[in-house]
Amino acid sequence: MTEDTAPPAAPEGPTRCGFVALIGEPNAGKSTLLNRMVGAKVSIVTHKVQTTRARIRGVALAPEQNAQVVFIDTPGLFRPRRKLDRAMVAAAWGGAEDADVVALLVEAHRGVTEGVETILSGLRDRAPRGRLILVINKIDRVKAEQLLALTAKLNEAADFEATFMISAEKGHGVEDLRAWLGERMPEGPWHYPEDQIADAPLRMIAAEITREKLTLRLHQELPYQLTVETESWEERKDGSVRIQQIIYVARDGHKGIVLGKRGETIKVIGAESRTEIEALLERKVHLFLEVKARPNWMEESERYTHMGLDFTDTKG
């Protein structure tokens, strides 16, 4: 996988291609479903809410339908408090408005929460142009009768064209969802080469991988007050790549937390991130991490551009 893209492949027979927006509350399983559909990790997954910040597009195939399904993994929809929150929520609704199919993910064990009700209200107000479907995730956590009751309640609240019950983590029901989506993508040529799995610069995906490792290692609020940017990407003659990344934290005091005692924490994070980036690129990676304090990074438009967010969507 490289940062260069070849012309899309031309499968035999009629082809289909379209966009599916995954929306829902934070931690509903959108990133897990995207990675499952694509067959590789292109969006980070952690136990913490609001991990996804940018709209990441994952490119999946539905071979029997000769379809290319482009999934838009949107930030979770929640009540925004900060400038970054508002940009994330705007990106989520923007993804829904642009899609051919909008899939609302709801956690089976949590049911119709206040957050889900807010999203349903937003869907009614915005009326996305694409088909609206319901995807109840994490079905392995509840009993069948609970699932049926939840399905009935949600279908009374919105006009869903179809309902799917899945476990994105374990793969249950995912192939039925893939086939349904493949059949309903608009007829037309594929937008991406057959072997492309994401519509995002590799330098952004690499930065997100490092941010995932930081989020998993660190605690409480610190992960939301840091961001990672790939400062340089050097292709080397031996086929390896040298990547320099900067971890921006909001306070000088946070640098020590990221570095750890004698630099042990940053060493572990760097090793874990390098291993995963190497698996993604299928070649050797030389990864160098630097930690810098940047107190006002959440107020800088350049930081939003690096995350694929629109700084102008932060007013509220």
Image (tube, rainbow, N blue to C red):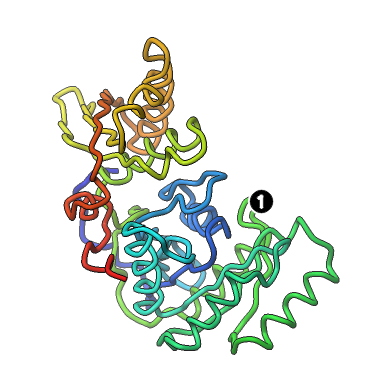
Q: Residue at x 36, y 34 (%)?
A: 277
Q: Residue at x 40, y 68 (%)?
A: 92
- Front-most of residues 171 and 106: 106
Q: Tell me the residue that label 1 is attached to.
A: 170
Q: Look at the image and tell me whether residue 13 can be seen.
A: no
Q: Residue at x 32, y 39 (%)?
A: 206
Quarter of the picture holding the C terminus = bottom left
- Front-most of residues 219 and 286: 219
- Image position of 249 with respect to 93: above or below: above
Residue 262 in the image: x percent, y percent?
A: 38, 10
Mark 1 secondary-structure assignment: loop
Q: Mark 1 is on which residue type?
A: Lys
Residue 303 in the image: x percent, y percent?
A: 22, 49
Residue 210 picture quarter: top left
Quick check: 45 left or right of 285?
A: right
Q: Residue at x 51, y 38 (%)?
A: 220
Q: Look at the image and tell me whether residue 249 can be seen.
A: yes
Residue 250 picture quarter: top left
Quick check: 100 left or right of 201?
A: right
- Image position of 232 with respect to 301: above or below: above
Residue 261 in the image: x percent, y percent?
A: 42, 13
Residue 18 in the image: x percent, y percent?
A: 38, 75
For label 1, count other residues whose C-alpha is less than 10 Å away and answer few (under 14), some (14-19) or many (20+): few
- Front-most of residues 241 and 53: 53
Quarter of the picture holding the N terminus = top left
